[in-house]
Amino acid sequence: MADVDSGGGGGHGKKGGGSKTKKKSTKIDMTAMVDVAFLLLTFFVLTATMTNSAMMELTLPPKEAEEDPDGKVKVDEKKILTLILAANDTVIYYVGITEPEIKYTTFADDGVRKVLLEHLNRQRPLCKQVDNAKGCWDPIFLVKPKKSCRYKNVVDLLDELAITEAPKYAMVKYADQDSLFVEDALLKMKEKAESGN
Amino acid sequence: MSKKPKRGVPTIDMTAMVDVAFLLLTFFILTTTKFREDQAVEIDTPSSVSKTETPAKGLMTMSVDKEGKVYVGFSDIGTRIEAVRKAIAENKLEVTEEGVNFFSIQSEFGVPLGQMSGWLNASDAERDKFVQEGIPYIETDTIAHIGNEVKDWIRWGRLSDQRMRFAIKGDLDSEYSSVAEVIEALQDWKINQFSLITKMEEAPDGIGFSKAPKK
């Protein structure tokens, strides 16, 4: 089997091969060693834990802050893009809070990423964290996962926000009034469309 | 060389193959830092572009599987022992020293407190057959706040290791409701900063806001 032929073996070729007194073979039988090596190799391959797990840091607003109305900061509603994660991999999104236009998207290639980039690019230049000069754009993203959505969608959306380098985003609890709000907005949109026709 | 019809077994030069085998062997020996511990549950995590590696120490992991069952794991053996002793003392469980030792080698568990002593005191053969049904996270008594055992384990973990970090390891297909319950439990203890464990993924090029062409 696996063995090293160190010259003398067949007596072919090279210089010293001709002398017939040195015909003693110096072959070492390495079969056993190779067997052990492969056994160990198999063992290590199978037990090796691939370090491919990463961590995504997440900071949530404290619970008390959500309940405290005085602690709220006023922001321009046009800055806020709310993304509601619903069942069946759908995303409901709208800008602002007064009579928003409710739209739907998915996690397909030109889905939610396009929406995020559109909102980021709505107005240039983007505010730097230090200078908050007037006229610069400071978009905020709110992620509201419904209880019925898949966990994968939550991670995917947070990941999309990281990929598009969104400067400000937060994950907020989806409350009952949110679904009322969406229904209400959809109704108003319908009314508008009908009166327009 | 003259032709000889019968020369016995033909030899194959395997030197190169053996070289490669040893090279691989050396590589795997050197890169294996920790052997895979017995996992109570197999979880397929979603992927993200995050590059932060999961720390090997000082981490408490709450795994949520497809069916919404929750499993808890402590990374440090010392923390495991301390945490389980707190659980035993607070719930007046009767667990042998051997049971505590057995607990200390579990990287993850999903046994409700009610079955804890039965599981830890069992013989090896019985433990193999034991079905871990997940740690309950719904309060059975909403007034006295009893029954959310995930919340209890977070407290025991935090008490055992003040600098404990927390991570949630959810399955791709798990419903968000059960993950939300775990987050809720963390937030009840004012832990608003934690991590989600994901698989590493390459970030697509040229997508980022700063890299996009300016108008």
Image: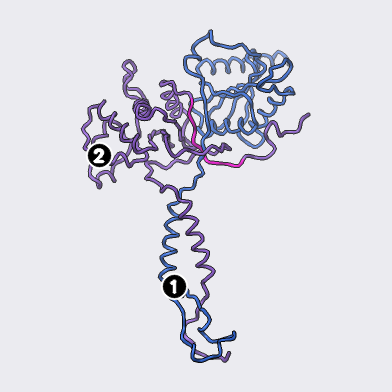
Chain colours: A blue, B purple
Q: Is residue B81 left or right of residue A170?
A: left
Neighbour class for label 2 at 10 Å: few (<14), some, many (≥20)? Answer: some
The residue stretch that appears in magenta:
B193-202
Q: Secondary structure at mark 2?
A: helix
Q: Is residue B154 left or right of residue A87?
A: left
Image point 46% across, 75% down: which residue? A1
Q: Secondary structure at mark 1?
A: loop
Q: Nearer the viewer, residue B2 or B143?
A: B2
Question: Residue A10 at x, y = what percent?
Answer: 52, 85
Q: Which mark is residue A30?
A: 1
In this rendering, is residue A26 above or below A76? below
Q: Nearer the viewer, residue B39 or B67?
A: B39
Q: Which mark is residue B99?
A: 2
Q: Mark 2: which amino acid?
A: Gly
Number of numbered tags placed on the structure image: 2
Mark 1 or mark 2: which is in front? Answer: 1
Chain letter, disc 2 residue? B
Q: Mark 1: which amino acid?
A: Met
Are the residues under marks 1 and 2 on the same chain?
no
Neighbour class for label 1 at 10 Å: few (<14), some, many (≥20)? Answer: few
Q: Nearer the viewer, residue A43 or A153?
A: A43
